[in-house]
């Protein structure tokens, strides 16, 4: 059996549509996860109420200590059982968000530790309200140092989206399966998917290098 | 009852088993420059940080301009202070300058000075920028407005920090070892700015190890040890004729380590006293 690249090209338009869905769920899931993790980071710092911290800790260790595929299935099958009916797309994004949030929380914890306490004290002593201290002084510094790990986390989310194929989200992997189960040319079709996944991740990490360089130049 | 301009009364602070402040009271009148000296760990920084409630004491109260800065709530609990709007208003009246400058590295020099003016004093940007540039001129950094803090020397960063505090039109300046983290040749620039401030009648509370500087600017020097005020008075009295053994020993150590040629406490005078 020989490799016939025309099958890759024939599949390409549909693969690109699938890649668009992949990018869409990744972006939404990642942005929601960073937002949620940011809110939780601020909350656990200014309101270190013991039960809240314990619940957060349990959540993080459950997410990190279980396979993502199981988490996805659980959200997809369990929520309807308790009466919450959401489609595979929403369930998939929710799973990505909840999974990634645990990791982003740890990234932001590290970033926060790198901001000296004096930075906040300066803001406090000038009379800035607490939330303004966070918005103008602390979080910008946290995010600047967290760019590399956050970009890495983004590509991790992107690379975990094929798992959503199992709950019938029609993203790049599922599209590929649909195509090669009809034309019986998995190698050609999957090669196309392979290249598309790589291009997406590569573009993101290149972009982050440029962004970092710009911030670096700005701060010399 | 009329209160002093700044009134610290019966401040007590514990760090674990250590008493950092042991029932300390101190009154400061408007326009007065008070220097806090003492061995490290004596509580002088803690005292300064209590004034704007950055380090809320376990007991006691601070009044500035006839209004409380912070008071221990009846229910206890230090945390409650963070959403107290009166506290933020009182804090904005006090400029604080730190040993490590704490200039914000992600903002330009100008933005460092502009932000709090806009947020806390609700000044429009144009006005805030004008004020910031004028202050930068005053501290000798008129040409550095668009620099990033990381491109400045320590002494320049500290002068930016001073300008940032002054932009809030404070009635009191708190300075926590403002020159301790600086290379010796940069110290004089910062001290020069502080002297000018003192001459203009700014009320200042300064924690410092620069006895020569303290002798020049202070109306009163406060010597602390083990969380208590041991001795205080005008620099001439205190430095030339210390009445306590502890202060005499402290001055003696300092002059051995770091003799000031022009300091009023010549080693011989101390030796005679001992």
Image (tube, coloured by chain):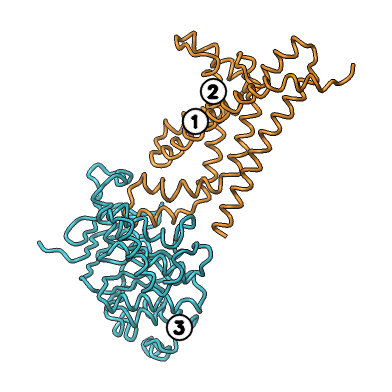
Chain colours: A orange, B cyan
Q: Tags 1 and 2 in contact by the CB under 8 Å rule?
A: yes
| Residue nearest the viewer, comparing B159 with A50 | B159
Residue A45 in the image: above or below residue A10: below
Give the secondary structure at mark 3. Answer: helix
> Disc 2 or disc 3, which is closer to the eye?
2
Specify which label sits upstream in the sequence, 1 or 2. 1
Marks 2/3: CA–CA distance: 69 Å
Q: Which chain letter matches label 3? A: B
Q: Which chain letter matches label 1? A: A
Q: State the image coordinates of residue A164 (x, y, percent, origin top left).
A: 62, 19
The structure residue drawn at horizontal position 37% and vertical position 55%, both measured from the top left corner, is B115
Q: State the image coordinates of residue B127 (x, y, percent, origin top left).
A: 30, 61
Residue on which the image places disc 1: A32
Marks 1/2: CA–CA distance: 9 Å
Instruction: Tell me, yes or no, whether dots 2 and 3 are on the same chain.
Output: no
Q: State the image coordinates of residue B134 (x, y, percent, origin top left).
A: 34, 70
Quadrant of the image occupied by residue B233: bottom left
Q: Which chain letter matches label 2? A: A
Q: Residue furthest left?
A: B1
Residue on which the image places disc 3: B255
The structure residue drawn at horizontal position 46% and vertical position 79%, both measured from the top left corner, is B253
Residue on which the image places disc 2: A93
- Label 2 packing within 10 angstroms: few (<14), some (14-19), many (20+): many
Q: State the image coordinates of residue A26 (x, y, percent, origin top left).
A: 58, 28
- Label 1 packing within 10 angstroms: few (<14), some (14-19), many (20+): some
Label ID, residue B261: none
| Residue nearest the viewer, comparing B253 with B34 | B34
| Residue nearest the viewer, comparing A124 with A213 | A213
Which quadrant: the C terminus of chain A? bottom right
């Amino acid at each position: 059996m020989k490799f016939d690249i025309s099958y890759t090209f024939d599949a390409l338009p549909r693969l690109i549509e699938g890649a668009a869905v992949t990018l869409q769920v990744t972006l939404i899931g990642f942005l929601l996860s960073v937002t949620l993790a940011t809110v939780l980071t601020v909350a656990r710092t200014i309101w270190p109420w013991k039960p809240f911290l314990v619940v957060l800790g349990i959540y993080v260790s459950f997410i990190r200590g279980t396979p993502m595929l199981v988490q996805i299935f659980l959200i997809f099958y369990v929520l309807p059982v308790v009466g919450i009916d959401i489609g595979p797309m929403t369930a998939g994004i929710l799973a990505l968000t909840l999974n990634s949030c645990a990791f982003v929380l740890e990234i932001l914890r590290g970033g926060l530790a790198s901001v000296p306490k004096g930075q906040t004290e300066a803001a406090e002593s000038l009379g800035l309200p607490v939330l303004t201290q966070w918005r103008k002084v602390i979080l910008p510094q946290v995010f600047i140092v967290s760019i590399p790990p956050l970009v890495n986390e983004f590509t991790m989310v992107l690379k975990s989206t094929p798992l959503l194929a199992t709950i019938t989200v029609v993203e790049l992997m599922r599209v590929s399966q649909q195509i090669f189960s009809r034309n019986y040319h998995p190698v050609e079709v999957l090669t196309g998917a392979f290249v598309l996944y790589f291009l997406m991740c590569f573009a993101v990490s290149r972009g982050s290098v440029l962004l970092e360089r710009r911030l670096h130049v700005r701060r010399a | 009852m009329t209160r002093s301009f700044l009134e610290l009364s019966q401040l007590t602070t514990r760090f674990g088993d250590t008493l950092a402040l042991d029932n300390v009271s101190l009154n400061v009148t408007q326009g007065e420059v008070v220097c806090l000296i003492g061995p490290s760990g004596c509580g002088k920084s803690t005292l300064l940080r209590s004034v704007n409630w950055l380090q809320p004491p376990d007991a006691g109260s601070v009044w500035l301009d006839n209004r409380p800065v912070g008071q221990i709530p009846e229910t206890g609990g230090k945390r409650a202070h963070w959403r107290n709007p009166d506290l933020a208003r009182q804090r904005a009246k006090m400029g604080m300058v730190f040993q490590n400058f704490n200039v914000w590295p992600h903002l330009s020099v100008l933005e460092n000075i502009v932000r709090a003016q806009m947020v806390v004093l609700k000044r429009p940007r144009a006005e805030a920028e004008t004020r910031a540039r004028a202050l930068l001129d005053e501290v000798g950094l008129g040409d550095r407005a668009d620099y990033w803090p990381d491109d400045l020397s320590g002494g320049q960063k500290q002068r930016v920090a001073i300008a940032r505090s002054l932009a809030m039109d404070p009635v009191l300046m708190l300075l926590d070892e403002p020159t301790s983290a600086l290379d010796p040749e940069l110290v004089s620039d910062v001290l020069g700015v502080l002297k000018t401030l003192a001459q203009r009648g700014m009320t200042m509370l300064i924690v410092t190890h620069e006895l020569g500087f303290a002798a020049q600017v202070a109306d009163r020097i406060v010597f602390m040890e083990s969380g208590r005020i041991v001795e205080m008075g005008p620099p001439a009295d205190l430095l030339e004729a210390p009445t306590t053994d502890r202060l005499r020993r402290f001055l003696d150590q300092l002059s051995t380590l770091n003799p000031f040629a022009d300091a009023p406490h010549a080693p011989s005078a101390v030796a005679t006293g001992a």
